[in-house]
Image (spheres, grey):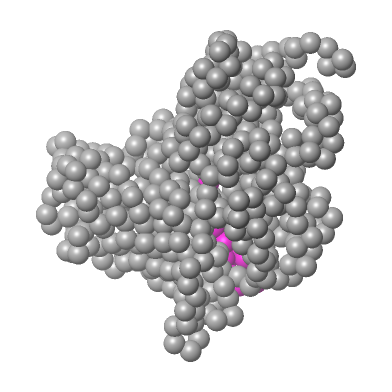
């Protein structure tokens, strides 16, 4: 989330998007489509197969900001395929194999088209391995609030933040949250660096005299934009969440001491949210503070959110941001958007969550209510709608704030018990799956036994801001 009103928001900049071209247009129905069909991102993701798992092997040379890598995707063909696409930008590709046999490929823009020697049959499991190398190039996406992709830190290392469309700038991927997969990372770094990714650190083994390979296993299916590999110098800390959830923190060494203080209430926070939202949805958790400032942003990278160095202060000033990224594990990570136009299901929910932590956990419901009223008062009277705000307004303040106000007013209307039952049911029913706004509304209507369709319509789908119900001072 953003700390300050971001002058670097990109909504007013124009970046032409790489368009699908003639190259991969099917002249037969045996060629996978170049996009999954998300209107905001016509070439994001691909058709014709379902990715199941990625094995990513990266040998990182921080001194030269260079990667020698291979990515093996295990997938299942959903149709007969003479050719299919991955999303991938930059780097030199050494070669590609499909089921172990050398395959032909072509590249155009962000699309990599692979033609296996043997066509794939509908229902067939297959694996595709891409060997590549080069210098990662940070990605200026018109959809993201800051520069995304693989970026350098201030200590010679690197970090990766990719929401929404940066993952294809560091590995070949079916880059859309509709196609979640498990991941295993094998990251080799010089001995004076560590590698930190999603999931659990399962192995750390020396490679020759000077290098170490870190193996990270991310077993909970994950949207590609939430995958991350970070190289740096960190102090590790272990905490334990509710029901024994391991919390493995990595704090950039210059701020590690203060970070231990700042993050000390995270287990309590996880327990508090678990009581409201249901069981924490993943096998593991942990916070990562990088040695860089990135424009006041943090990202909810799955099981291991990333914070810039400036979000460590020693006096818990940015604790609400830790609450925000933790809440995303339920809202956005476990339940993933089916289409990016529903991004309020991530940001409105996470925003309301950190408001609850800050004003209600550390205050009272009355204080929260006042804070939400104040948030309401700052909302524009007319704005792009919260659902489907337009592809360059996905991360606008209005999506966060009007989304959060909507949830607060729903809560006041339904009462705490029914409201949190709605959230628990929604989280459970769609755990690890994809969601739309209509899915959420359907759960609310069913659990509450009321028809809230019109309420959501006014708050989320109209540009005019509805009046605050009742007396705000009462
Ligand atoms: N999802 C982030 C949040 O917690 C905001 C965000 C979107 C972001 N794209 C990003 C942060 C890229 C860092 C990098 O609100
Ligand atoms: Zn957020």
In the rendering, at what x and y percent does residue 98 appear?
21, 59
- The N terminus: image quadrant: top right
In the displayed image of the protein, which residue is found farthest to the left? 118
Residue 289: tell me if it is visible: no
Left or right placement of residue 71 versus residue 269 in this view: left
- The C terminus: image quadrant: top right
Q: Residue at x 71, y 46 (%)?
A: 269
Q: Residue at x 22, y 51 (%)?
A: 125
In which image quadrant can residue 450 be found? top right
Looking at the picture, does residue 300 appear above or below residue 342?
A: below
In the displayed image of the protein, which residue is found farthest to the right? 473
Q: Nearer the viewer, residue 411 or 134?
A: 411
Looking at the picture, does residue 71 appear above or below residue 81?
A: below
Q: Nearer the viewer, residue 146 or 370?
A: 370
Q: Nearer the viewer, residue 415 or 13?
A: 415
Q: Residue at x 75, y 14 (%)?
A: 468
In the rendering, at what x and y percent does residue 68 appear?
40, 71
Q: Look at the image and say whether residue 154 sits in the magenta stretch.
A: yes
Residue 37: tell me if it is visible: yes
Q: Which residues are magenta?
A: 151-163
Looking at the picture, does residue 135 appear above or below residue 39?
A: below
Q: Residue at x 88, y 17 (%)?
A: 473
In the rendering, at what x and y percent does residue 317 appear?
81, 50
Left or right placement of residue 173 versus residue 268 in this view: left
Left or right placement of residue 130 versus residue 175 in this view: left
In the displayed image of the protein, which residue is found farthest to the front? 243
In which image quadrant can residue 313 be found? bottom right
Q: How many marks?
A: 0
In which image quadrant can residue 452 be found? top right
Left or right placement of residue 208 versus residue 292 in this view: left
Q: Nearer the viewer, residue 343 or 115?
A: 343
Q: Look at the image and say whether residue 388 sits in the magenta stretch.
A: no
């Amino acid at each position: 989330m953003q700390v300050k009103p971001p002058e670097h928001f990109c909504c007013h900049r124009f970046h032409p998007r790489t368009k699908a071209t003639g190259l991969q247009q099917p002249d037969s129905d045996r060629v996978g489509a170049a996009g999954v069909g998300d209107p905001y991102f016509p070439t994001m993701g691909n058709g014709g197969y379902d990715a199941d798992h990625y094995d990513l092997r990266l040998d990182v040379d921080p001194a030269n900001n260079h990667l020698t890598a291979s990515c093996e995707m295990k997938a299942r063909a959903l149709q007969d395929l003479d050719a299919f696409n991955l999303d991938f930008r930059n780097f030199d590709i050494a070669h590609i194999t499909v089921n172990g046999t050398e395959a032909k490929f072509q590249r155009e823009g962000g699309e990599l088209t692979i033609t296996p020697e043997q066509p794939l049959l509908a229902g067939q499991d297959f694996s595709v391995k891409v060997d590549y190398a080069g210098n990662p190039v940070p990605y200026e996406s018109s959809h993201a609030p800051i520069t995304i992709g693989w970026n350098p830190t201030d200590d010679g290392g690197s970090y990766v933040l990719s929401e929404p469309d940066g993952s294809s700038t560091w590995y070949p991927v079916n880059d859309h949250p509709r196609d979640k997969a498990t991941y295993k990372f094998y990251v080799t770094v010089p001995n004076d660096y560590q590698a930190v990714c999603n999931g659990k650190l399962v192995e750390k083994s020396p490679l020759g005299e000077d290098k170490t390979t870190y193996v990270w296993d991310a077993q909970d299916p994950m949207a590609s934009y939430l995958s991350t590999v970070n190289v740096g110098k960190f102090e590790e800390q272990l905490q334990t969440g509710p029901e024994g959830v391991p919390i493995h923190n990595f704090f950039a060494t210059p701020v590690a001491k203060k970070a231990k203080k700042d993050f000390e209430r995270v287990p309590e926070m996880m327990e508090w949210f678990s009581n409201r939202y249901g069981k924490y949805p993943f096998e593991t958790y942990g916070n990562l503070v990088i040695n860089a400032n990135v424009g006041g942003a943090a990202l909810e990278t799955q099981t291991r959110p990333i914070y810039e160095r400036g979000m460590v202060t020693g006096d818990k000033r940015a604790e609400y941001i830790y609450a925000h990224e933790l809440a995303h594990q339920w809202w956005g990570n476990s339940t993933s958007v089916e289409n990016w136009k529903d991004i309020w299901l991530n940001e409105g929910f996470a925003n309301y969550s950190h408001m609850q932590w800050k004003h209600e956990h550390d205050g009272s419901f009355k204080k929260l209510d006042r804070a939400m009223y104040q948030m309401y008062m700052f909302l524009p009277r007319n704005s792009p709608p919260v659902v489907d705000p337009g592809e360059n307004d996905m991360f606008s303040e209005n999506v966060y704030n009007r989304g959060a106000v909507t949830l607060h007013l729903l809560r006041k209307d339904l009462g705490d018990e029914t409201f949190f039952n709605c959230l628990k049911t929604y989280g459970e029913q769609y755990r690890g799956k994809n969601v739309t706004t209509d899915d959420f509304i359907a759960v609310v209507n069913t659990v509450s036994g009321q028809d809230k369709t019109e309420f959501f319509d006014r708050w989320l789908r109209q540009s005019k801001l509805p009046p605050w119900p009742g007396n705000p001072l009462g």
